């Protein structure tokens, strides 16, 4: 067996599909946690579609995320984001990667928790900074001290991300490993376990 499925056990994949059913698997977490990269791999393993909510927002608005922030501000962007994600949650199953602030919105979070299966990709500050400092396209990091801004976001958001159905540790290893751990975490819910800590 080759490809992404080689990193996950076939019984786990089958169990994960059963656990998910018709629901969407929704990745939440801070920028740089790997939601899109891991989400795509997990979608391949489960043989279901992958959607990035930021890409969907850009398609419906015909503007980039930075342009939306600049033109309308964060509150208007979050309102649009919430509408798009709630629409996406109506059909499934698929894997949905969300922007870092999406789960912070109470309406969006309630919809995700009620209609999807949520996974928090949790990463420490050093890992996140290593990944995001190479790009200057993050609207929330256009500050005098972007690393401190990222640290502040971590402090503010991690308690809320902790409300997700599962937590998987994102770290500096091959993305196939994190994807396989995500599949195993979903599969474990077949036995009634809600959170799988990973090392």
Image (cartoon, rainbow, N blue to C red):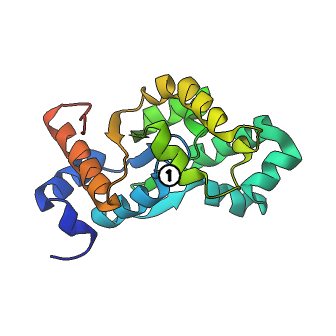
Quadrant of the frame with the N terminus: bottom left
Determine which residue is flagged by label 1: 97
Which residue occupies 20% across, 57% down?
A: 13
Which residue occupies 75% across, 43% down?
A: 77
Residues 87 and 141: in front is: 141
- Relative to 187, is 152 on the left or the right? right
Q: Position of residue 168 (x, y in %)?
A: 33, 41
Q: Look at the numbered disc 1 and give the secondary structure of its residue.
A: strand
* Circle 1 residues within 10 Å: few <14, some 14–19, many ≥20: many
Q: Position of residue 139 (x, y in %)?
A: 73, 47
Q: Visible in this render: residue 100?
A: yes
Quadrant of the frame with the C terminus: top left
Quadrant for residue 37, please give it: bottom left
Residues 151 and 112: in front is: 151
Q: Determine whether 86 is above or below 50 in the image.
A: above
Q: Position of residue 164 (x, y in %)?
A: 41, 32
Quadrant for residue 120, please give it: top left
Q: How many marks?
A: 1
Which residue occupies 70% across, 43% down?
A: 141
Q: Position of residue 84 (x, y in %)?
A: 64, 48
Which residue occupies 50% across, 25% down?
A: 160
Q: Determine whether 152 is above or below 168 in the image.
A: above
Q: Visible in this render: residue 28?
A: no
- Relative to 55, is 14 on the left or the right? left
Q: Which residue appears farthest toward the bottom when viewing the image? A: 2
Residues 124 and 100: in front is: 124
């Amino acid at each position: 067996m080759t490809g992404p499925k080689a990193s996950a056990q076939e019984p786990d994949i089958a169990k994960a599909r059963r656990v998910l059913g018709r629901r969407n698997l929704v990745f939440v977490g801070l920028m740089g946690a790997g939601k899109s990269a891991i989400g795509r791999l997990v979608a391949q393993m489960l043989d279901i579609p992958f959607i990035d909510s930021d890409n969907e927002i850009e398609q419906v608005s015909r503007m980039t995320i930075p342009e939306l922030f600049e033109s309308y501000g964060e509150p208007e962007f979050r309102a649009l984001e919430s509408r798009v994600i709630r629409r996406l949650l109506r059909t499934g199953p698929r894997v949905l990667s969300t922007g870092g602030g999406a789960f912070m919105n109470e309406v969006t979070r309630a919809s995700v928790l009620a209609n999807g299966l949520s996974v928090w990709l949790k990463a420490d500050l050093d890992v996140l900074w290593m990944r995001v400092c190479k790009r200057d396209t993050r609207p929330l990091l256009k500050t005098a001290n972007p690393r401190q801004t990222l640290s502040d976001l971590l402090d503010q958001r991690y308690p809320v991300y902790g409300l997700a159905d599962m937590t998987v540790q994102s770290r500096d290893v091959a993305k196939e490993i994190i994807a396989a751990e995500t599949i195993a975490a979903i599969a474990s819910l077949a036995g009634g376990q809600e959170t799988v800590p990973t090392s």
